[in-house]
Image (cartoon, rainbow, N blue to C red):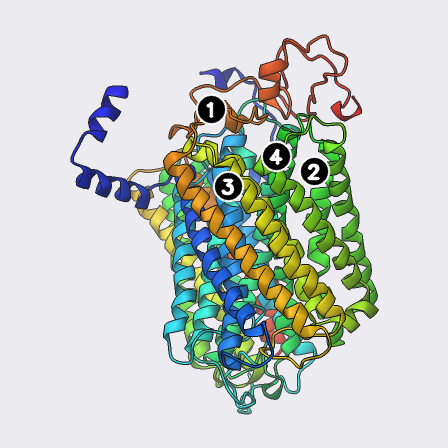
Amino acid sequence: MAASAIPHKRVHPIRSFLVGDEPMTTGLWGIIFFIFSEIMFFAGLIAAMLALHSDTLFWEPTNGAHRVEGDHLLPILFTVLLVSTSIPMQFAAFAIRKGNRKAMLINMAIVLVVGTAFIINQYFEWTHAGFGISDGPYAATFYTLTGFHGAHVIGGLVFIFAQWLRGLLGHFDAKRNTAIEAATLYWHFVGFVWLLVIFPLVFFLS
Amino acid sequence: MATLAGAQTSTYAGANAWRVILEWLTTVDHKKIGIMYLWTAGAFGLVGMAFSLVMRTELAQTGTIISAETYNSIFTMHGSVMIFLFLLPVGAAFMNYSMPLQIGALDMAFPRINALSFWIFLFGGVLLTLSFAVEGGTASAGWTAYPPVTLDTGNNAEPPGAGMDMWLVGVILLGQASIFGSVNFLVTIFKMRAPGMTMWRLPLFTWTTLVTGLLILLSTPVLAAALVLGFIDRNGAEGAFFDPAAGGQPLLWQNLFWFYSHPAVYIMILPAMGIVSDVFGVFTRRPVFGYRSMVLALIAIGLLGFIVWAHHMFTTGGVFLPFFMGATFLIAVPTGVKMFNWITTMWRGSNIFPTAMLFSVGFLMLFLIGGITGVFHAAVPVDFALHDTYFVVGHFHYTMSIAATFGFLAGCYYWFPKMFGKFMNEGLGKLHFWLLFIGVNLVFFTQLLLGLDGMPRRINDYVANPGWELMNMLITIGAFVSAAGMMVFLYNVVYSLKWGERAGSDPWEGTTLEWATTSPPPAHNFDSLPEIRSERPLFDLRFGERLQDDPHYHVNNGHNGSNGGGAKQPDTSSREEG
């Protein structure tokens, strides 16, 4: 076809790393714009938390509950785990860019397992927090931020799982992999929102 | 094809009607979705107008007809319906309908998500409207919904009921529809342009769609954050976010809310500006003066729109006044550039004045008054004096409500032949224009005067200060004159759909690509596209050959196009110097 007559354009290495050398599809542009809107959503929530922290009558949970030092260990562990799943997710994208569907499925399975473990740990964090959502600004922002982030993790997992099933059915190859690239970008967003912003705020502003 | 269509029309009429309804309910065609947005938003606009008539009846004289609670509910729903269910979706309607046609695309980038946007919008709108039926009535804290009056914590003597929650959830849904829509618009403009349609050749309405899309994309999620915080505050957090007694900050809501709602003003007015630019480009028979400066001004308005939100909060004492005052003054500059360009386009143009052009000129007049009173407000001392008076009400109605509505009505008259293949009736259109123009000026200019005299907004009764009763009566008369104008418009729509004069594919001698296809366009939009060598491809198609040797005819080549132009490129210097 005519496309093969066009000489292969050099792609910027960062672009190549993130979304491969193939032309950007509409789906990829869509997910990139959507991630920008998600960033603004979390920016709104985080700005609210910082504003409340800087100027409130009381910040600590009103029922007197405190997070004890040892409590930081588990959240830190699961933070490392969640963020490091960006690596197998990226490997899944690398694999399918070369047409290796099997490696993609294995890497995505790792992401699915660790992501689910993160959600289970979040459930324990919620049930063992010692304060309820109505116990003052810190408690309310804690549940809001971790809750919305958790919802986004679950959304990401559902999306990845759907693509994993499609992979089992034999979908995706080196040319047609927009959904995998989109899932990878979204998963990076979910991890980095947690690592860079929500985790430090929630666990060190307490 | 012709025989097939004939066979379909000859089938049993009842079954045919069901088939048509099913087709509209399941459509992913951007044109049909655009038209559905237009009908739905128009219906909601009539509801909003009915609310305004109730308010004006109440305020026509001193003394009360309806209770303060009902009045609160009515003005809240007037604002919410008009903004979230009329102005924003009407903009979305035109962006859906015209933008893909203007860039020569088959459809939007994500047709099914486009349909999803519409249905989420409709569901959110219905939810908002249904709050009249619940106990405690609708939200009644104004469309700005400032806490703590929205909260149900102990501090609030009369906490709002479930209607407030429905308002919060409804607006979240409407915001979600907007975000999906904006992703769609942006990707469509970036990815779906026809060959030769470079960024510097986009019609101005498409440029406004692009900037509006970016504004929606980056500001609406912040409103969503505010709304979910508000919802959690009422359902679980017991005021920890916004009730000072529980450790919250009412100003936090105002900051988050206006971070969206100031850009939202531009989300409403920019598409109207785009329509008006295109209309001027056609009915002055000249290219729009300063195409690139129009685009740059548009981008500047978009950028500045993000750093001025706190001018809505000058009197709270919680914002840094000099910065927000300065930034707000700055917005007058790109807006002034646009006004200058529109007026200069008409200057020595071969102007003709069909109704679409009348409404565009009306837009300029109304937006001028609205814009200049906006500069008054940007000055902190003036704002301190006029805050929460009818001067504010007059100002924002002049800009984002009435000016935007005039722009959208210009769009209705301009694109109606494209949408339905028939002209709107010109006589009725002119009657509509003059009734509406006189009516709204009577309403809102009097409101400016009333505000200068100190009458506060959002009250259902007032003392009979000298002149107040007369001015309020004038406003009420103006409101009913405007409503009569809109009734003429409604009749015109029905009349023109049934008996309107048939319009060809290019009834206005347009310049942009939507006029290159039939009216109404086929499902796939274009059978063939003309060569695109400037931002006025149809003008080139009509006159390019003839004007090839004319030194005054220059083609704007664009700079970033790989597919830029065919064999003939007469002149690369910019056209507006000609």
Q: Which subunit holds the residue at mark 4?
A: B
Q: Position of residue B414 (x, y in %)?
A: 54, 35
Q: Which subunit holds the residue at mark 1?
A: B
Is residue B272 placed above or below A23 in the rendered structure?
A: below
Q: Quadrant of the C terminus of chain B?
A: top right
Kindly state the secondary structure of the residue where label 2 is placed. Answer: helix
Q: Nearer the observer, disc 4 or disc 2?
A: 4
N-term mark: 1 or 3 = 3
Cα–Cα gap, marks 3 and 4: 19 Å
Q: Residue at x 59, y 83 (%)?
A: B243
Q: Which subunit holds the residue at mark 2?
A: B
Which amino acid is tagged 4? Val
- Residue that label 4 marks: B279
Q: Nearer the viewer, residue B413 or B26?
A: B413
Cα–Cα gap, marks 1 and 2: 28 Å
Whether residue B262 can be seen here: no
Q: Nearer the viewer, residue B387 or A90?
A: B387
Cα–Cα gap, marks 2 and 3: 34 Å
Labels 1 & 3 near each other (Cβ < 8 A): no
N-term mark: 1 or 2 = 2
- Residue that label 3 marks: B428
- Residue that label 2 marks: B295
Q: Nearer the viewer, residue B449 or B435?
A: B435
Quarter holding residue B64: bottom right
Cα–Cα gap, marks 4 and 1: 17 Å
